[in-house]
Every structure is written in C-alpha cells, then in structure tokens.
Amino acid sequence: MRLLLNLLWLVLSGLWMFLAYMIVGVLWCITVIGIPFGLASFRIGLFALWPFGRTVVKKPGAGLGSGIGNVFWFILSGLWLAIGHAVSGVLLCITIVGIPLGLANFKLIPISLFPLGKDIVSISSAQGAGALVGPAV
C-alpha cells in the first residue's frame, strides 16, 4: 500500500514539492552561512518526494541554535513552502482519490515551517526507539 501511495504522491504532488525544496536549497547554499539551511531543504525535499513509510522525530542534541535557525527559515523559506503544501493539499482533497495525499500534504506543513532540530526516519525505527513524535505520513 505504501508503494502505491508513494507512486501516486510522486506524480500528483511529490515531484513538484521536491523541485521547490531543491530550488530553495540551492538558493540557501549560495551563501556559506546558508549551507545548513540548504542541507535541511535537501533533506526535507527527499522526504517530500517519497514520504509514506517515514516520519519526523526530534533530534536529541537540538537546542537554541535550531530554534534561532528555524526563525530565519520560517521567514525566508518555510512560510512559502508551507503555502505550497497547503495549496497542493486542498487541490488533492477536492478529488476522492486524492484525499489521503492531501492529508499527507497537510502533515508535511509543520516540518516545512520548522525543519531544524528534526530528523526523518522510517516509521518502524521510530516506533522501536519510542521516538515517534509527529504524525506518520
């Protein structure tokens, strides 16, 4: 079932959001100070490309630096990527077949807004470690 959902996702939403994250990542990497933000964008872009079967967990060592970085991310990139997920989610929810994909888009909004201090892992490893924080996509 995950494979089918991921394939539908790839065609209907994932590829477009992946490209948006890659563009944002390249723009962040233009400056040396933006490289950590660019890497975060690439990481989330891969998650947005193939999300089903993976989830987001908090990184154990994330602290004040991640919080401050998330403020910059939110203002310069996160809000715009979250709007992309919201619009895509609404458009997918219009169709009956697209409702699960639209809901998955809505679940990706929090990670698109505040990605620093979080990690993307498989659902089975998150459940095994007892670290399942966010909703599984």
Image: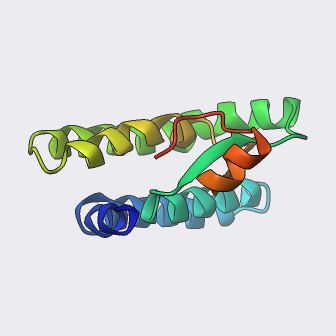
From the top left corner, tell me how far across and down residue 9 is, in percent. 31, 61
Q: Which residue is drawn at 62% across and 61% down?
A: 43
Q: Nearer the viewer, residue 93 or 117?
A: 93
From the top left corner, tell me how far across and down residue 128 is, in percent. 74, 48
From the top left corner, tell me how far across and down residue 102 is, in percent. 27, 43
Q: Residue at x 65, y 33 (%)?
A: 133
Looking at the image, how many numbered discs can be counted on the residues?
A: 0
Q: In this view, does 91 lie to the left or right of 131?
A: left
Q: Which residue lies furthest to the right in this view?
A: 61
Q: Which residue is drawn at 45% across and 57% down?
A: 52
The image's colour scheme reads rainbow
Q: Which of 81 and 26 is in front in this view?
A: 81
Q: In this view, does 48 lie to the left or right of 121?
A: left
Q: Which of 82 and 34 is in front in this view?
A: 82
**Vertical comparison of 98 with 28: above or below:** above
Q: Residue 15 falls in which quadrant of the image?
A: bottom left
**Vertical comparison of 51 with 10: above or below:** above
Q: Nearer the viewer, residue 129 or 20?
A: 129
Q: In this view, does 120 lie to the left or right of 19?
A: right
Q: Residue at x 60, y 51 (%)?
A: 123
Q: In which quarter of the image is the N terminus?
A: bottom left
Q: Residue 7 falls in which quadrant of the image?
A: bottom left
From the top left corner, tell me how far across and down residue 27 is, in percent. 57, 62
Q: Residue 99 falls in which quadrant of the image?
A: top left
